[in-house]
Amino acid sequence: MAEVLVYVDHVDGAVRKPTLELLTLARRIGEPVAVALGAGADATAAVLAEHGAVKVLTADAPEFAEYLVVPKVDALQAAYEAVSPAAVLVPSSAEGKEIAARLAVRIGSGIITDAVDLEADDKGPVATQAAFAASFTTKSRVSKGTPVITVKPNSAPVEAAPAAGTVEALAVTFGALATGTRITGRTPRESTGRPELTEAAIVVSGGRGVNGAENFHIIEELADSLGAAVGASRAAVDAGWYPHCNQVGQTGKSVSPQLYIASGISGAIQHRAGMQTSKTIVAVNKDAEAPIFDLVDYGVVGDLFAVVPQLTEEIKVRKG
Amino acid sequence: MSLRIVVCVKYVPDATGDRHFADDLTVDRDDVDGLLSELDEYAVEQALQIADEADDAEITVLTVGPEDAKDALRKALSMGADKAIHVEDDDLHGSDVMGTSLVLAKAIEKAGYDLVIAGMASTDGVMGVLPAILAERLGVPQVTLLSEVKVENGTVTGRRDGDSASETLEATLPALVSVTDQSGEARYPSFKGIMAAKKKPVESWDLEELEIEADEVGLEGSWTAVDSAAQRPARTAGTIVKDEGEGGKQLAGFLAEQKFI
């Protein structure tokens, strides 16, 4: 059976959920071979094996932490040459997409980004994508070279499928470009204890209607009652009420959770581009004419300062 | 010594228009007005700021696209760029990111550069991979997704705000930079800028000038193929209630029904 390379996104050995979703998709195409790089790479093997990796190729070197993107491309290319896979799958993070893109150029292959589903047919993998603010669904394939495909979080279920997960050291030679961009400083983002926005099953977002940074706690409290991530519209971010890393929309993050709750967000096309593929959409807005109501499964026309705290309270009561 | 900056820009269908695909499954550009991709305005802005700080700098804006794409160049010129290059060729129709990046890389090399600046993504395809591909093709450092950028003494430095950390980056020129919408608001063209833009040179290049074969680009030469494109069915109308004091509780009832609570 053909092997499929899966690039592993992990933090010091803790594998992030989108990688486990990739293993589910990789098994539809062939046998997953995982590539884990950097500090803690060896520690990823157990969970990767549990989810279907027949082999885990690992490498660590100072270059992975000290230089941007390219050392990881060198390593993924080494894995590609060692395995000759039928496809290469990479999580659709900002860095993941850059790694995949450079690899595609090097191996003379086409690239598909932000797939939301993947199926196998006799000519190779077919990727489903959302286009034009998710108003269209397309199906595409890579027609030259080995398909390189990045996949959005929440695109497949995480499934246990125990496999050998044999760990092998990957030999990597860094090229001249690897040390081109030095990382001279790194400030870790302070953890909020909430799920990562793009991976969360539930996202609760606030917009212009929240009317000030000091009011965002209303959104956060609702999020916490549901174990959700917090998002913000561009208007709220541009006003300085919430950090840019929480921005949902065309110029921020694209999310696809099971449940999306928009509060005080009118639903401009730029925002819809980032959340329209959410499974269930709920909105609270004073303006009955707001375009967001065209998208919702359930909408409340009302003042979020009354509706949202009442909702949070009721959720707490129901959860006991 | 003059700092040669090339800014890559894209002419895109207006996102507020009714965007759709043409019969050959390429983006339909006839039915929707086009404009300079908003995210590329940030790239032009940073180029202007870097040029202001440099002793001597020249900004060239570059685009690959049909005749209309000149509008994107004019906008960038009216913001303050010095000159423009338009790569136009019938054989380019339907090029994917690999084909387009090949054309851009050849054009950038032909134009000559110390620094290439791009937006973080286009607002139509929204792949966000072109800057990394260009850096790979040009063989220069990629200093991408910057929310702050500075060029001094042949070195580019910047801040990249990622999901888990904020990183500071450094590379020596020549280099490729991409900037996010956090890098600083783009200026509006002044009346003077708009008038001046009409007199600025716009060169037109075709594939032959760039020594690219027609079968390396365009729909036929594309590295990817779209099998189908279907409009998403309109969402079935949801339940909308007016809050009369119990809106939050009613919503909680819906969430419980859907098993979210």
Image (cartoon, coloured by chain):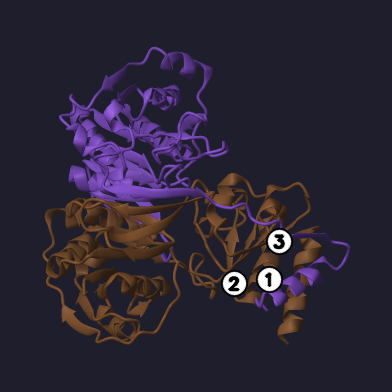
Chain colours: A brown, B purple
Residue at position x 32%, y 54% in the image = A141
Q: Quadrant of residue A49?
A: bottom left
Q: Which amino acid does the dot numbered 3 rest on?
A: Asn
Q: Are marks 3 and 1 on the same chain?
A: yes
Q: Chain of mark 3?
A: A
Q: Chain of mark 1?
A: A
Crowd rating for badge 3 (residues with CA inside 10 Å; few <14, some 14–19, many 20+): some
Q: Which amino acid does the dot numbered 1 rest on?
A: Leu
Q: What mark, if any, has residue A228 been given in the picture?
A: 2
Residue at position x 73%, y 87% in the image = A320
Left or right: residue A54 versus residue A84 is right
Left or right: residue A244 versus residue A113 is right
Q: Secondary structure at mark 1?
A: helix
The x, y position of residue B254, in whole percent, is 74, 71
Left or right: residue A2 versus residue B80 is left
Q: CA distance from mark 3 to mark 1?
A: 12 Å
Q: Nearer the viewer, mark 3 or mark 1?
A: 1
Residue matched to label 1: A222
- Whether pointer 1 and pointer 2 mark residues with C-beta atoms closer than 8 Å, the reply is yes
Crowd rating for badge 2 (residues with CA inside 10 Å; few <14, some 14–19, many 20+): many
Q: Which amino acid does the dot numbered 2 rest on?
A: Ala
Q: Nearer the viewer, mark 3 or mark 2?
A: 2
Q: Note whether B113 is above or below B82 in the view shown.
A: below
Extreme residue toward the right, this view: B244
First along the sequence among labels 3 and 1? 3
